[in-house]
Structures are given as C-alpha cells and as structure tokens.
Amino acid sequence: MEDLVIRDADVVDGTGADSYRADVVIDDGRIVAIVQEAAAAGCQRPKAVRELDAEGLVLSPGFIDMHAHSDLALLRDPDHSAKAAQGVTLEVLGQDGLSYAPVDDRTLDAVRQAIAGWNGPGDDIDFDWRSVGEYLDRLDRGIAVNAAYLIPQGTVRALAVGWEDRPATPRELDRMRQLVAEGMEQGAVGLSSGLTYTPGMYAEDAELTELCRVVARHGGYYCPHHRSYGAGALEAYAEMVELTRKADCPLHLAHATMNFGVNEGRAPELLALLDEALAAGADITLDTYPYTPGSTTLAALLPSWASEGGPREVLRRLADDATAERIRHDLEVTGADGCHGVPVDWDTIEISGVTSPELGDFVGRTIQRSSSLRGEAPWTTARRLLLDDGLGPTILQHVGHEENVRAIMRHRVHTGGSDGILHGAKPHPRAYGTFPHYLGHYVRELGVLSLEECVAHLTGRPAARLRLPDRGLVREGFRADLVLFDPRTVAAGSTYATPRTLPTGIPHVLVDGRFVIEDGRRTDVLAGRAVRRSPM
C-alpha cells in the first residue's frame, strides 16, 4: 500500500494545460499514480496508508524561487516558513555574483562583510566549507526546502583577482575558468553575476564571455544582475544577450525589471529586444517579483570607484571628508553606476534593516525623512548609517512601475523569483509573499495571468531552465514536491508595514513526499536537499 493518496484535487500540472480532477498517489517521495476522475468512474479508487481530502483545493508542483537569498537562512533557520509557507519547494541560491563558495579564509571574511545586509554577518554560522561541493554537502544535512546553487562570479573574481578595478591577467583568468569548472562539476547549475556590485562589476565582457563558455560546456546557464536597471537598462540587457550569444550559453535575466523614471512604460522595448533574440535562436528566460520597489544594500548605491579594494577600503573612504564629498556628488549629481546611472532620490530610499540595534529608529523611514527629523542633509544621514553600521543597512528602493511589472510577467519566458532578503527588521514583503501574491493578486483579482499559465511560470518553466528531469510537473515518476492551495483565498499576508506575515490559503506543502506545511502549520520535517546539476 502506498504512502499517501490526495483525493479529488484540481490538478494544475505545471505545463499550462487546463486543470483536471484527479486522485494523486505518492510513495517513497514520488508520484506513482494519477487517476483522473473520468478514468476512475466505476473503478476502485486507489488506496494508501493515508488519505487527504483535497476537495476545493488546487494541487500543483511546488513553486521554484529562481532568485533567492537564503544562502545562510536555510542553515540558520530550520523552520524557514518564509518560503515553505508560500509553497516554495526549491530555491536557487548564489545570486547576484556574491555568495559563500568558492572561498578561502581571506575572501570569506570580505564577502561576509560585503553582503551582511543580505544575510546578516553570519556570526551564528559555522562556515565549515570552502568549495561549492562542500557547501552543497552542508545543505544535504537537511534543510526545509530544496536548493540549487549558482557559482557567484564576483566571489570567484575576489578569490582569483581581488577587489581591484582592473582586467584579469591571463593567469588569473585561467584560475577563474578553473574555479567555475570545478563548481559546475561539483553540482552548480550555472553562474551568476552582480554587475553593479563589486568586485564583479570590474569584469569586462571578454572575461565574462570566457567564464560563460565554461558554464555552457557543463550544461549550465548564466544569470546576470546586469550593469544597469536605470539609465542604461536596455543597453545592459542587449549587452547580456550579445555576450551569451558569443559564448553559446543559455541566459537567464535576474529580476528583469525596468526601473526609475527614465524607464516608465518602456517594458515593451525590452520584450521586443528579447523576442528578436529568441526568434534568432537564443535560449533566454527571465524572472521577476510581483512588486514595484527593489531591495538591496545601501552600500550598493555607491560609485564603483569608492568600492574598489573591498569593504574596508569603502569604510576608509567614507570616513574621509573630501572623499565622501566626491561620493555624494556622484550619487546626487552625476548618477553613480551603483545607482544605475540615475541621480539618487533620497525620498525613494527606505531603510529596511540594520545590523546594529541602536540604529533601529532609522528602519521604516526614508533617508529623506530621517535627515529632515535630524536637521541634516540626506547624504550626512546616509553616510552616518554606512559608517556606524559597517555597511550593514539594507534598503527598499521605490523606483518601479506597475505597468512594466505586468507587461514583463506576461511574457512566455517569464518565471517567478522573490529576490527575497530575509535579514532586517522590515524586509521587502516579497520575501514572504511573492508566490501567493502572484496567485491571489495577479491571477484572481486582476486576471493578468490565468491560473494554469501562472503555475507554469512558477513551476514547469523554471524546472526546464534548471534542467531538472523529474521536478516541476505533476506527472507520474516525478518527485512529490507539491503544494495544495485554495484559489479562492490564497493571498500574501506580508505588507510593507508587516512584511513577515505568512500567507493564507496554502494549507499543505510537500517536499519529497513529506509534509513541511500541514493544515497551515510548519512541521519539523527537513526533507530539503541540494539539487545538483543534471549530467549532460
């Protein structure tokens, strides 16, 4: 007798096809039978040790978060309800070119400080790994949901070159190729870049192309946070399309937005660019989150020259009055490359988290608001925060446009990604709400996508990009990574005021056939493991 039968579910299978009513039978972590209502008429229904009545619920594949920042959260927080309660059964880590493998002792310390705003300083984590394979082995000890990993190009460059703004030498490029090849062989699914973050932004296209060729040979894909989402956004997208064409490497565009006032209403131009490349044979996908603000670290806005040399050099420059004035001019007048070439509007920069508790009063306020309360210039406030919190503050950046968000999510190569930063007192609500927000707001309330279409964007399509042969669909023989939700009530609970509120309407989530969410509550199951790249 099998482990579980889910009875009378409305199956939305992840392909985009119409839903159907069925009993779904699970045994030993896999779907072993799907008995549709018509086929079951007059026949004995399947039996199992346990039966779950799914009347009125949709059964779909578990959601795949194509852009997650849970690199330490999965180790720190076994509960991980932020993602499990959304129906997420797989996250893709190692994003934006900065993460914790491959490293040595020297680069690990610098990376930890550089992205403390994303993941916290990590003082509570035993960093007992250095290579990509060792990090994946650490995940295999048991985590709440599954995780795949992208090799972070900025971390690779820090290890081989350092944090200097210069071309790599031939020997350094060979070392980077070797590190990428080793990471792919150890199970990574591709390569990420953060081309507005140091040190990744110091790489020229020729260097990136060489690394992408290595990734392509191993069956992976390139996932860039490209050089601009603002003044040079379309040019930056085109650059990535051309780069991967030369490398013959699949391209997945991270958080593919068109932001700032210069790009209002310009999503159709981006989509036309992508359609032209797709028609010419390019292999392109993208992900977005269903919200208008972005989120990153406050330090990320700084000009690249101010970040050369790593976090310690950044703090030294900020402490020097003359250098700090140069930074201010680039931010407020010129438009720093870290701020996508657009002069910063401090009224759009809201502090979402700090690492020092004594700075908590700044959280939830814009830089402009805090500076007004303090009777000082906005840059004075921002500089004080960066120095006093050791580059730790995270921000919401209110620079998006709803019409762009809707247009891009409709595209045939679109997938879902939360870009969720879980650290900080008031994180972006996308960290806790992305997937139910798609289903509740954009499907049920607005009708931007049909239910079947949206589920395909969140399951089958990302699984295909990741080259997962047995995940992402409700199909016999596939892994039983599944979610049951009520299409009438599913909704994000998280808001900008209460960003850590869990969603509603998602009573059951299974990872590898085991309940991680049951009757709306987190169980103690840690069924997640590292999902390694499938051999070519």
Image: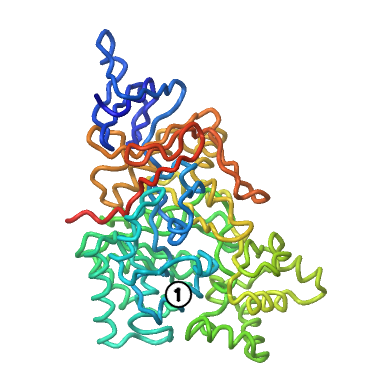
Who is closer to the viewer here, 317 or 258? 317
**Label 1 CA crowd tier, 10 Å (few <14, some 14–19, many 20+):** many
The residue tagged 1 is 111
Percent position (x, y) of residue 343? 63, 73
Percent position (x, y) of residue 325? 67, 86
- Vertical placement of 244 versus 406: above or below? below
Q: Residue at x 28, y 19 (%)?
A: 47
The quarter of the picture where the C terminus appears is bottom left
Residue placed farthest to the top in the image? 42
Q: In this view, does 396 lie to the left or right of 200?
A: right
Percent position (x, y) of residue 535? 18, 56
- Vertical placement of 64 versus 215: above or below? above
Q: Which residue is drawn at 41% across and 36% down?
A: 483
Mark 1 residue type? Val
Percent position (x, y) of residue 442? 53, 39
Q: In the rendered image, which quarter is residue 195 located in?
A: bottom left
- Color scheme of the displayed model: rainbow
- Vertical placement of 128 versus 481: above or below? below
In this figure, what is the number of numbered marks? 1
Q: In this view, does 368 lie to the left or right of 49?
A: right
Q: Which residue is drawn at 27% across and 25% down?
A: 34
Q: What element carries label 1?
A: helix
Q: In the rendered image, which quarter is residue 172 located in?
A: bottom left
- Vertical placement of 45 versus 210: above or below? above
Residue placed farthest to the left in the image? 536
The quarter of the picture where the N terminus appears is top left
Q: Is residue 529 left or right of residue 351?
A: left
Q: Residue at x 55, y 79 (%)?
A: 303
